[in-house]
Structure formats: C-alpha cells, structure tokens
Image: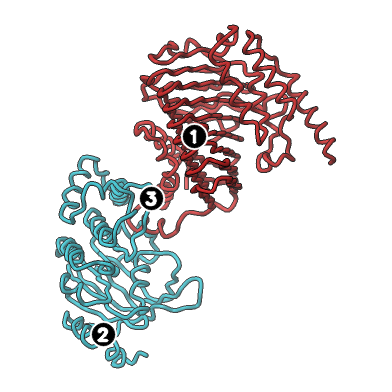
C-alpha cells in the first residue's frame, strides 16, 4: 500500500532538516502507529505525505500502490486514495459542511473518471454515516468546523474520511483535545472503516488511543527517524518507561 | 495651486457640464426642488481630483461633458432576479420603458413616474425629492447627487402604505454605447409599511443615480442591488435614507465588472431603536475601479448600524472603501459596526480603505476593522487535501470570504440569486 523509503525532508524556508531517513512499509488492511516525543517529526511526516507546501524532499521516495506520489498535487494524492485527518482541522466560514463534502466527493469522483454523486444519493449516504458518528443535521449545515468543539472537529474529520473512502488513512494526533467519550466515538468511527483493502497510519503521543484503535505494528519516532518497531506491547512499554530508554538504545541524543 | 484658482477651475468645470444638460420642465414643486438643487450644485462645484473625498477615485470621467463610450456586453446567462416574482419597472438607457414594464399597480403601494408626478403642481414626493439629498450634503459635499436632483430626466416615485405584496424590481438596460443617464427615485415608506426593492442592469455608458428613501416609524425597507454586465460602464450612485424610530433598513449591493463605480450611501438615524445594515460584495478583474463611500449619522438613541464590505480583486483591479460613523451628542446606546476587507488574488491589485469613527456620546459601542489579505494557504491546503482542485478550492474560499456580506440578505431566495451570480463569475474565470 504505502511504501516510504529513506525519506529525507527539510524545511523549504530554512536550513532545518526534519526527517532524516524514514523507512516504512504498510501492507493493505494493516494499522500502523507512530509514537514519539514532541518535535520528533511525526506531524511533518503526515504533512509531507499529504502534499503540504513548505517542505522539501531531499532524498528518498514515497509510493502509494507503487505509484510515486511526491510529485503529485495534494488533490491528486487525495484522488489516489490518501487521506489525512488533521490535528487542527481548519475553519472555513461561509461554506456549509455539506457543500464542502459534496464538492470534495464529486471532485474525487471526477478525477477518477466516475460520475458525480447525485444530490439525493449524497444526502442518503451522508445522513447514514453522520448518524453513526453522532453528527446531527445542524452540524452538517453549519460552516465547515466553525464554532465546532474539539470533539466535533475530530468527528467531522472522520465523517470526511468515511465519505471519501480513502485506501490509505493517516490520523494525525486525532486524540488530541478529546475527552474519553469523544475518543471512544472517534475510534469507533475509525474501526468501522477498517477492512482488508484499507490501511491506517495512526500518529499519536499517547498509548490510550491505541487501546481503542488496535495497531498491528507500532513504531517509535525520534529525531526524524523510526528508531524502533514492534507489536502493540511497544506502546505499553513507552507508556510505562517514556521515550528516554528507547532513545538511548537507538543511540539518539 | 491657490485656493481661488481651484475654485475657478471647479466653477468652470461645473458650468461646462451644466451647459450640456437641460433641466426638465415641471410643475411648481418639481421646478423649485430642481432649482434649489442647481444652486446647491453651483455652491459646491463638481468634484475635482484634489478633493479629499475623491482622493482614491478620479472623478474626471464622471464629470466630463460627454459620457465615455462603453461597449455593450452580451451575456448569455439570464439576468439576475429572473426567477423572482416581482413588479418589473424597466429603464432603457435611463428612459422608462412602459412596454417592457409591468402595470405600475401594486396593493398598498402608489407608483408614479417622475415625469408625470413632476408635471403636477403638488405631489407627496415634494417632501422627499431633493430633501434627503440636501440633508446629505453636510458635512461632506456630494455634488453629483445635487446635479442629479437638478437634472434627472426620469425616475420612479414609490409610496408604500402597507406591506407590499412583492418586490419592486428596477431593471436598467443598456442599449446605446454613448448613453448618459440620470435617474432619480424617491421611496417613501409610511408608518409600519414594508417594501423590498431590487435593482439590476448596467443602465447606461455613464449612469448617475440617486435613490432617496424615507423610512417612517416601524417601517421596513430591503434593498438588493446587482451591478453587473458591461465592463466599460461607469456609475456614480447615491442612496440617501432617513430612519424613523423602530424602523429597519437593509441594503446589499453586488458589483461585478464595470470600469468605474462609486456607490455612496448616506444614512441618518432620526428616531430611536432603529436598525440599518448596509453591505457590499464586489469582484473585480482587470480594469475595474470600485468605490464604496458610506456615511452614517447616529442622531437618536439605541440604534444599530452595521457596514460589511468585501472586495475580491485581481489583475490590477482597485477597490476603495471610505466609511464613517458619526455619533452625535446624545445618541447614547449606539451600536456601530464597520468592517471592510479585501481579498487580493495577486500582487497587482490594490485596496484603499479609510475607516472613520467620530463619536460625541459617551455610552456607545462602536468598532471598525479593515483588512487586506491573500487566500489563506492553510485553508487552501485543507480543501485540496480532500481532493478539491486548486481552482475550485480558491473559488470556495472566495465565497467564504464574501459570506459575511452576502448573509446580510435576509430573504433566502434572493440570497441564492446573488450567490448564483458570484458562483457564475468565479466559474467563468480560469485559474
């Protein structure tokens, strides 16, 4: 599914190297988690994968189903099946949530050479999916993310994911700003999307999200590299001992 | 240049312009109003480049003797408001077209053509025609409006006594490339009356229009205007209104295309607890100069005024905003809000803003803000990351930017008409 090889990334505007050789291969249907301390490069990885401006790839490659995505525009990556659930979803006043979603769904269908979804069909599908995420009609009508609580914003991200049906989902600190109930709701939304053809990359500080979204593989990121990989028990180890021991093992400062 | 010379130059320019105009014949009240307006005009002279109030907009083409030619633009899409049930009043190059208009009859409303009413010796409009314009001449002179009151050749007079069953729609068709139109409308809403007025169309190569609106106690007036189509047209419009207590005034203007547009609005609160909202959305591409000049006077207690102006500019288009809130002594509990914002889609476009507050009461809440910015890159990335193309994402963000102004239109179907226009304009632009 997603194959990252020796990825080196620096900031475009300044001489700051953030990713220093990331290697990661995610198989179809699997859930990988990346944990790591602040500033280790976790969010940068998610931005670079989704095509945000401001980063320069100096070495390495990223392919999605064997297609190089690094030269693609963000919308092309989305149409190719990549989705990033933002840590800080952006507020867009004056654009209805539903209008936005329909525009996005149809833009992707168009890019893939499919027919646009009719208004009636779209409405039927979105109502169904919104219901499971406990998103009411009002939230669908309101401008995108404007005045949404932290939990509402994250649920809205998952709704977008459910509507767009990507094959590679990246969740960037989806648990931040969520209380226990909201985290449960969001996780259920994510778990409902798990299937053999869809993979997930879950980026988080804390182990608690991984109690709800059970990963197949856990990676530890530090100073721009994945320094250790293992099963779900690695997340528990971090929870108990922190990152210091792992960093020392890997020879990182 | 010495002050005396400037005065002489103004005097000459004014007389030169007047010499090309004929004051229409009329009965006693109209003749008086027109002659008074002419002496007002002579007293102040037409605007000149050096006038502070015309610092950002060159008045030359608005005051020169002949209207600069303006090519007719053949738009394939149906005109705005076409789907709205309304009473249509059509002017072709500034001349009332009875055949194209509906019958001028509507329950609770009296409608007269200016020409007819002016011929009478007495008419209700005598208390409004030129009166609100004259009040609006202080503290800032608006000579093009005085010229209009003196020389307007046509217009419509509307008196509303009840709740108008449907909107009155003024449609301005442009058919001659050299037309120079001067129209003057008077609208009087009696106590508790309600009316919506729609305006659209390019009108003429050069268009000078005044609309005076007297809103009596408890009356409600809604105004939605779409200035579009012909790219080379020029317009100077004035909207004068005086608001009675507990009254409501809401005006929205969409401007697209046009070489030069100056829309002035003068709003006076004379009764307590009234509300006035005035909003504008302008989209300019290339040779486009758009000026919104607003003056709001609070001279009553507990009134609310709100100005919301948004401009989207590209390819060298220029936007101007001059907005003032004057709160007189004793106008306590005034709530005044003003925002003017420009979204510049490239480095060639320009926005010039002059927001002003002048407050003589001590218990008021007034605020103003003005911003100039580019498309928010974070928002653009967010939309694109969902698969929306860059062009479509930019268009969505333009609509998002305009929303605060467009939302001032209360009626949902009329708001939709405007949004359709905005969307159409965006879709026709590439990249």
Q: Can residue B93 be seen?
A: no
* Front of the two marks 3 and 2: 3
Q: Quadrant of residue B76?
A: top left
Marks 3 and 2 on same chain: yes
Q: Which residue is drawn at the image coordinates 41% and 28% (left, top)?
A: B218
> Which residue is outermost to the front?
B330
In this figure, which residue is indicated by the disc labeled 1?
B253
Q: Which residue is drawn at the image coordinates 52% and 22% (left, top)?
A: B172
Is B13 placed above or below B50 here? above
* Alpha-carbon span between mark 2 and mark 1: 62 Å
Category of crowding for the residue at label 1, using alpha-carbon neighbours closer than 10 angstroms: few (below 14), some (14–19), many (at least 20): many
Residue A187 in the image: x percent, y percent? 18, 65
Residue A199 in the image: x percent, y percent? 21, 67
Q: In which quarter of the image is residue B153?
A: top right
Q: Can residue B73 be seen?
A: yes
Q: Chain B is drawn in which colour?
A: red
A4 and B426: which one is in front? B426
The quadrant the N terminus of chain A occupies is bottom left
The quadrant the C terminus of chain A occupies is bottom left
Category of crowding for the residue at label 3, using alpha-carbon neighbours closer than 10 angstroms: few (below 14), some (14–19), many (at least 20): many
* Alpha-carbon span between mark 3 and mark 1: 20 Å
């Amino acid at each position: 599914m997603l194959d990252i090889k020796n990825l080196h990334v620096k900031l475009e505007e300044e001489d700051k190297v953030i990713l220093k050789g990331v290697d990661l291969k995610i198989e179809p249907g699997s859930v990988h988690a990346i944990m790591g301390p602040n500033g280790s490069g976790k969010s940068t990885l998610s931005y670079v994968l989704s095509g945000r401006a401001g980063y320069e790839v100096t070495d390495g490659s990223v392919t999605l189903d064997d297609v190089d995505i690094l030269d693609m525009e963000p919308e092309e990556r989305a149409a190719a099946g990549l989705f990033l659930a933002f840590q800080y979803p952006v507020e867009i006043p004056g654009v209805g949530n539903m209008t936005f979603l329909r525009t996005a769904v149809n833009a992707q269908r168009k890019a893939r050479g499919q027919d646009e979804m009719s208004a009636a069909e779209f409405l039927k599908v979105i109502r169904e999916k919104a219901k499971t995420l406990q998103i009411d009609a009002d939230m669908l009508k309101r401008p995108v993310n404007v005045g949404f609580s932290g939990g509402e914003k994250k649920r809205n991200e998952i709704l977008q994911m459910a509507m767009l049906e990507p094959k590679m989902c990246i969740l960037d600190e989806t648990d931040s700003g969520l209380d226990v109930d909201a985290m449960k709701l969001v996780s259920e939304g994510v778990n409902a999307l798990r299937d053999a053809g869809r993979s997930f990359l879950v980026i988080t500080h804390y182990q608690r999200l991984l109690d709800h979204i059970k990963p197949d593989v856990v990676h530890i990121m530090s100073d721009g590299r994945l320094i250790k990989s293992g099963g779900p028990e690695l997340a528990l180890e971090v929870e108990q001992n922190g990152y210091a021991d792992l960093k020392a093992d890997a020879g990182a400062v | 240049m010495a002050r005396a010379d400037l005065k002489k130059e103004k005097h000459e320019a004014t007389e030169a312009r007047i010499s090309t105009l004929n004051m229409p014949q009329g009965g006693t009240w109209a003749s008086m109003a027109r002659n008074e307006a002419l002496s007002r005009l002579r007293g102040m002279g037409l605007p000149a480049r050096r006038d502070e109030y015309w610092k950002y907009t060159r008045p030359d083409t608005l005051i020169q003797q002949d209207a600069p030619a303006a090519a007719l633009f053949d738009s394939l899409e149906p005109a705005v408001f076409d789907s709205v049930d309304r009473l249509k009043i059509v002017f072709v190059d500034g001349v009332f077209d009875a055949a194209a208009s509906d019958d001028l009859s509507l329950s609770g409303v009296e409608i007269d053509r200016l020409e007819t009413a002016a011929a009478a010796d007495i008419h209700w409009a005598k208390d409004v025609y030129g009166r609100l314009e004259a009040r609006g001449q202080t503290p800032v002179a608006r000579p093009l409006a005085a010229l209009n009151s003196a020389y307007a050749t046509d217009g419509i007079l509307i008196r509303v006594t009840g709740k108008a069953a449907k909107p009155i729609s003024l449609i301005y068709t442009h058919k001659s490339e050299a037309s120079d139109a001067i129209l003057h409308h008077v609208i009087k809403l009696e106590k508790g009356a309600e009316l919506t007025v729609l305006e659209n169309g390019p009108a003429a190569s050069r268009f000078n229009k005044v609309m005076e609106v007297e809103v009596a106690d408890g009356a409600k007036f809604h105004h939605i205007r779409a200035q579009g189509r012909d790219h080379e047209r020029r317009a100077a419009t004035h909207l004068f209104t005086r608001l009675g207590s507990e009254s409501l005034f809401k005006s929205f203007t969409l401007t697209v295309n046009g070489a030069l547009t100056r829309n002035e609005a003068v709003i006076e609160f004379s009764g307590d607890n009234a509300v006035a909202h005035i909003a504008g959305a302008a989209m300019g591409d290339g040779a486009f100069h758009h000026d919104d000049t607003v003056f709001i006077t609070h001279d009553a207690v507990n009134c609310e005024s709100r100005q919301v102006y948004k401009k989207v500019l590209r390819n060298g288009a220029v936007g101007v905003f001059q907005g003032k809130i004057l709160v007189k002594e004793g106008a306590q509990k005034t709530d005044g809000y003003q925002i003017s914002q420009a979204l510049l889609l490239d480095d060639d476009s320009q926005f010039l803003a002059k927001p002003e507050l002048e407050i003589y009461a001590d218990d008021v809440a007034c605020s103003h803000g003005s911003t100039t910015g580019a498309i928010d890159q974070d928002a653009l990335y967010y939309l694109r990351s969902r698969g929306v193309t860059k062009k479509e994402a930019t268009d969505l963000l333009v609509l998002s930017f305009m929303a605060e102004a467009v939302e001032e239109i209360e009626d949902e179907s009329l708001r939709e008409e405007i949004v359709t226009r905005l969307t159409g304009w965006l879709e026709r632009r590439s990249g």
